[in-house]
Amino acid sequence: MIVAIPKEKTAREARVAATPETVKVLIKSGLKVQVETQAGNQSFFSDQDYVEAGAQIVNSSNELLSFADIVIKVLPPSLEETSQLKIGSVVISFFQSTREISKVKALAERSITGFSMHLIPRTTLAQKMDALSSQANIAGYKAVLIAATHLGVFMPLLMTAAGTIRPAKVLILGAGVAGLQAIATAKRLGAQVEAFDVRPVVKEQVESLGAKFIAVESDSDEGVGEGGYAKETSEDYKRRQQELIHEHMSKANVVITTALIPGRPAPLLIPTTMVDAMKPGSIIMDLAAENGGNCELTQKDQIIEYKQVTIDGTSNIPGTMPVHASELYSKNIAAFLTYMVKDGELNLDLEDEIISGAMFTHKGEITHEPTREALNT
């Protein structure tokens, strides 16, 4: 079977879905690997690196896609790319299937089996396939560094001959993978760090990293969703949550928001009135910008200034660290693909919770229930 690695066509996407290291893994599992010329250039992997790993370089994108049995990508295939795919082939990529309905329909019409790395179940067995976590880790780290470059103050406490420099105050909204990495990075830079999350269970993790955990008092775990994700909360909880966040934001130099519910619009945590209360020179890093943002003023892939507060809506922060982002993502992809390959052939066991969980189209049908519901709304 032929596995194809196309060059990502989006200008802001520097990652690649396979590295020379993972090409070797795929070949060892019995697959033939073809790579579009210059697919790895922006991640600093040359065509020669892929050739030495055992891959074949293909110059034509159309030729690559039309003969491939399996296509692995970072971003979903465009409608043009989908039209070039072989009928009945398999595509694996990041794919928000409930939000990209036209692309889902295009795949189904060509009987293409679609797998989304967004849908990989959060189980122990699937941990090494969890691309959301591997990329969120990078986003949390880099967001703090970007915020530090925007800031007009030091991050750490400094004792100087001219006097004491107070440490910056950093507030992290959401203590998932990205939030925890942001906490750890901000602490390494010497900032005072606070973190908020709707899930009380993460309090211990937050405090183990040296941050203060702030929480809305509640008698239930209403913010805890399936698979460890956060979920929507009640209106009363949201009101008390906003009051608490407002209080702490007014004292913060940096606010990093990470609240993202897979496949859904990002929850609004920071209305304009909260930004109005922030200090001049403060920074908001909105890591949920891809799905609309946690801040009302966020503009996707724009850095704006509102009343002397900088709001950074960069949506693909992992793509700014393409070497490690590609290395991690390609390992996630390779782990998932080799899990399905037996003796060089694809074995789609639909009873397997990882395979069926990540699948959203198969044999002309939309197999993912939330995606079907989104199609009918």
Image (cartoon, helix red, strand yellow):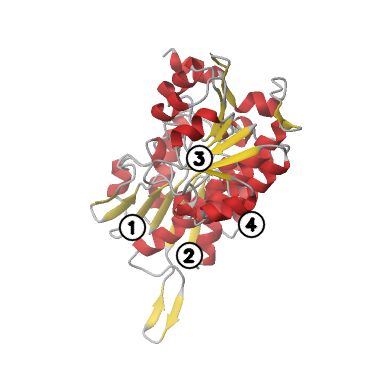
Left or right for 237, reference 345: left
Reading the image, the residue beneath label 3 is: 74
Q: Are marks 2 and 4 in contact (CB under 8 Å)?
A: no
Reading the image, the residue beneath label 2 is: 191
Residue type highlighted by circle 3 = Val
Q: For the residues marked 2 and 4, what is the alpha-carbon distance in whole angstroms?
A: 15 Å
Give coordinates of residue 226: x percent, y percent: 61, 29
Residue 208 is tagged as 4
Residue type highlighted by circle 4 = Ser
Q: For the residues marked 3 and 2, what is the alpha-carbon distance in whole angstroms?
A: 34 Å
Q: For the residues marked 1 and 2, what is the alpha-carbon distance in whole angstroms?
A: 14 Å
SS under mark 1: loop
Reading the image, the residue beneath label 1 is: 282
At label 4, counting other C-alpha atoms closer than 10 Å, the crowd grade (few under 14, some 14-19, many 20 or more) is few
| Occupied quadrant, residue 67 | top right
SS under mark 4: helix
Point out the image quarter for the N terminus. top right
Q: How many marks?
A: 4
At label 3, counting other C-alpha atoms closer than 10 Å, the crowd grade (few under 14, some 14-19, many 20 or more) is many
Figure check: 172 above or below 357:
below
Evaluate whether residue 222 shows in this view. no
Figure check: 44 above or below 128:
below
**In front: mark 4 or mark 3?**
3
Left or right for 332, reference 304: right
Q: Residue furthest bottom?
A: 161
Q: Earlier in the sequence, mark 2 or mark 4?
A: 2
Figure check: 346 above or below 302:
above
**In front: mark 3 or mark 2?**
3
SS under mark 2: loop
At label 1, counting other C-alpha atoms closer than 10 Å, the crowd grade (few under 14, some 14-19, many 20 or more) is many
